[in-house]
Image (cartoon, rainbow, N blue to C red):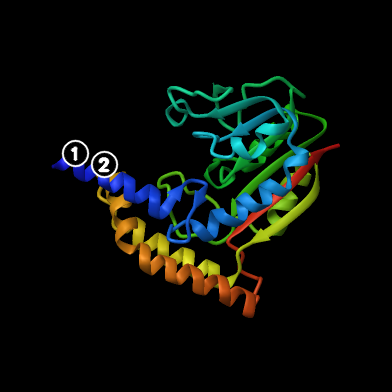
Amino acid sequence: MRDRLGWLERWLHLRLLGRHPYNTVLNYNWVNVRPMVRTLRALTPLVRGRVVDVGAGRSPYYDVFSAGVRSYIAVDRLSSLPSEEERPIARVAGVIEALPLRDGSADALLSTQVLYQTIDPRLGLREVCRVLRSGGHAILSAPHSSPVHSEPYDLYRFTPQGLRRLGEEAGLEVVRLETQGQLFSGFALALAMNLVLTPVSPGRPMEVRARRQLLFAPLIGLVNVLAYLLDRVLPFNRSPVNLIVVLRKR
């Protein structure tokens, strides 16, 4: 019975909430990830050749860029990389502050929601600059307003000006800087993440999180839809949820 219940929970989770990054409106992370996927798709012309995905985990955005990629390298802590990978993705253990790659060896670099967990973001961006070839592009995302999560690795939040300055100090040119999510999306994300992530059992956090997502899915879906509509009626833009910056190596 317990195994059947676990299978049913997994099936409901996939059908109702989607699979990251293709989350449904019932997912607590919908307002955060949905606009990111849309922007990344628009940036696919910049992602060609030898692509490095830093902090890749299971490389959820590989399918977005795979058409123009010659080789795809996932860099992350060994514990975060999948033990097996059926897609043509090379897995390399490392962190953004010390990328295990040669100078100028990447045509494009992707790093989503990594800088806020980076002990030294300035050093991380200098490493990004080092491994990019001249004229290569880096696409990075970082949170501006978000509840505390991913403890104990949640270290920073960023503003558009701060992210721009970090990139320029590293020797990179800011090609594009986009804010994502407005005031009401921030409210929706804060409520959803607090409902799902608090409290989380220290013993089995992922299991508790999955069950709480299913429990609160109808409420989260309603709040997400209201936030989406209100952001269009009242477009207050001084409290973005996320930032995406496109940098080019001069």
The image quadrant that residue 2 belongs to is: top left
Q: Kindly identify which numbered label has been placed on residue 11.
A: none
Up the image or down, 4 lies above or below 218; here it is: above
Residue wearing tag 1: 3
Is 123 left, or right, of 1 in this rendering?
right
Q: Residue at x 57, y 75 (%)?
A: 229
Kindly state the secondary structure of the residue where label 2 is placed: helix
Is 201 left, or right, of 93 in this rendering?
left
Q: Position of residue 244 (x, y in %)?
A: 67, 52
Q: Between residue 92 and residue 168, name the one nearer to us.
A: 92
Q: Between residue 204 and residue 84, name the one nearer to us.
A: 84
Task: Name the residue type under label 2.
Answer: Trp
Q: Position of residue 219 (x, y in %)?
A: 37, 69
Up the image or down, 59 lies above or below 188; here it is: above
Residue wearing tag 2: 7
Is 77 left, or right, of 230 in this rendering?
left
- Residue 229 in view, yes or no: yes
Give yes or no for contact between labels 2 and 1 (Cβ–Cβ under 8 Å).
yes
